[in-house]
Structure formats: structure tokens, C-alpha cells
Image (cartoon, rainbow, N blue to C red):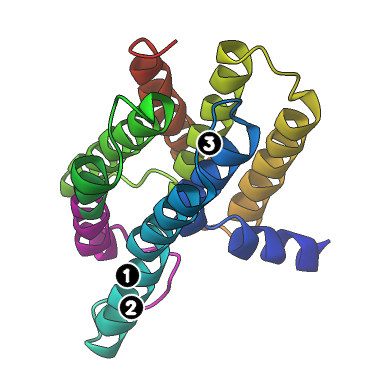
Amino acid sequence: MNFLLKIASYLFHPVWMPFAGTLLYFLISPRFFPLPVVKAKILAIAIMTFFIPIVFYLMLKTLGKTSSHFLSDVRERKWPLMLSAFLDLLILKFVLDTFDYPELYFFFLGIFLSTMTALLLVFFKIKASLHMIGLGGILAFLILLSFHFNLNLIFTISFLIAVTGLTATSRLHYKVHTSTELVLGILLGIVPQIAMALAWL
């Protein structure tokens, strides 16, 4: 069981979530997108939400600014969250637009709002679970897409709910977060997605 809980923290790390949401969107959306365009968008988002943050984390670790990629210390979160917010803005400005990809555009706008709120809380020394923000955001996005496109995604949604519960249990088990920080993270992930959905549902 300990092995499963540890694996959950790595597999469902928040750095994966924007890319996972993008991939799910292109897989389930009934809209037609030329394959070269899809590949280009996925590659651009992978670079900006996964590869650049990983390199940035390694740089911070080399400089002694962070001790763990889970950013357990609230003080270590400031620079990674600022970078994440900046990269989200670049994606919104140069990669996506509201005409061709309205759902995905507002998904990333929701991510940006979640990130900025988490960053604001850092200055008050309040630590929200980034794992829960990521999973809550992608879960809300998927549920909203199922309503929007009238798709039966019950198995995928059930899997995500189970994964969210497993990851939350992992964070509690390893004493990385309190239950309050987990609930705060879930809310920070879900609420902005629901708010942004008013623009495209």
C-alpha cells in the first residue's frame, strides 16, 4: 500500500496536469482539428508546462533554493508558481485562442487563476496542495466537457475521482499536507474551472 501511495504522488504530480488536460481535450472533443495542428499544440504545451518547469526546478535545486520537487516548504513555492503563471500567460497569448479552442483556452485561464491564487496564498504563508489543484482542475474540466459535448465519460471521471482520493491519501500519509490544505487545493482547482466555464458552456 505504501508503494501505491508513493507512486500516486509521482504519477499525478501537478506538473503533468495541464498537458493531461490538453491531451484529453483533443482525444474526446468532437471538433475537427488537423493532425499537424494538434501535434504542434500538444508539443508547445508540453514544452511550456512540463519541460521548462523541470529545467527550472533543477536550476533552483542546484542553487539550493528548493529541497524537493514536491515543494513541501511554502517558501520554496514562490518562484515555481511565478514561472508557471508566466508560462500560462504565454500559452494564452501565443498558443491558444478563444475562437478555435474556446474550451481549452478557458481551461488554461482557469489554471492561471488557480496558480495566481496559490501564489498569493504563499505570501500569507498558506500552503494549498498543488496536487489537489491540478487534479481538481482537470476533473472539473472533464465533467464540464462531458456536459458541453454531451459525452458519456463516466468511467474516465470515476477513474479521476479515485485517483484524486488516492493522491490525497498519499499526501496525508506522508504528512506533506493537512486535510485543510487538501480541501483548499481541491477548491482552488475546481472553482476557477467552473467560473471560466460560464464563458463557453
> Which mark is on residue 169?
none
Q: Residue at x 58, y 31 (%)?
A: 139
Residue 24 appears left or right of 59: right
Q: Label 1: how many residues lie within 10 Å, few (<14), some (14-19) or many (20+)?
A: some
Q: Do labels 1 and 3 touch, CB within 8 Å? A: no
Secondary structure, mark 2, is helix
Residue 165, x across and y down, in percent: 69, 39
User: Quick one: which residue is furthest to the right in this view?
Assistant: 1
Q: Residue at x 50, y 39 (%)?
A: 182
Q: Do labels 1 and 2 touch, CB within 8 Å? A: yes
Tag 1: amino acid:
Ile
Which of the two labelled residues, at mark 1 and mark 3, occupies the earlier sequence position?
Answer: 1
Residue 23, x across and y down, in percent: 56, 47
Residue 56, x across and y down, in percent: 28, 74
Tag 2: amino acid:
Val
* Location of residue 75 with respect to 195 vertically, above or below: below
The stretch drawn in magenta includes residue 68: yes
Residue 97, x across and y down, in percent: 28, 33
Q: Quadrant of residue 89?
A: top left
Q: Marks 2 and 3, how far apart in space? A: 24 Å
Let me know if residue 93 appears in the view: yes
Q: Quadrant of the C terminus?
A: top left
Check disc 3 and report the residue beneath it. 138
Check disc 1 and report the residue beneath it. 52
Q: Bounds of the magenta span?
A: 67-86
Secondary structure, mark 3, is helix
Q: Marks 1 and 3, how far apart in space? A: 21 Å
Q: Quadrant of the N terminus?
A: bottom right
Tag 3: amino acid:
Ile
What is the magenta segment's predominant secondary structure? helix
Q: Label 2: how many residues lie within 10 Å, few (<14), some (14-19) or many (20+)?
A: few
Check disc 2 and report the residue beneath it. 55
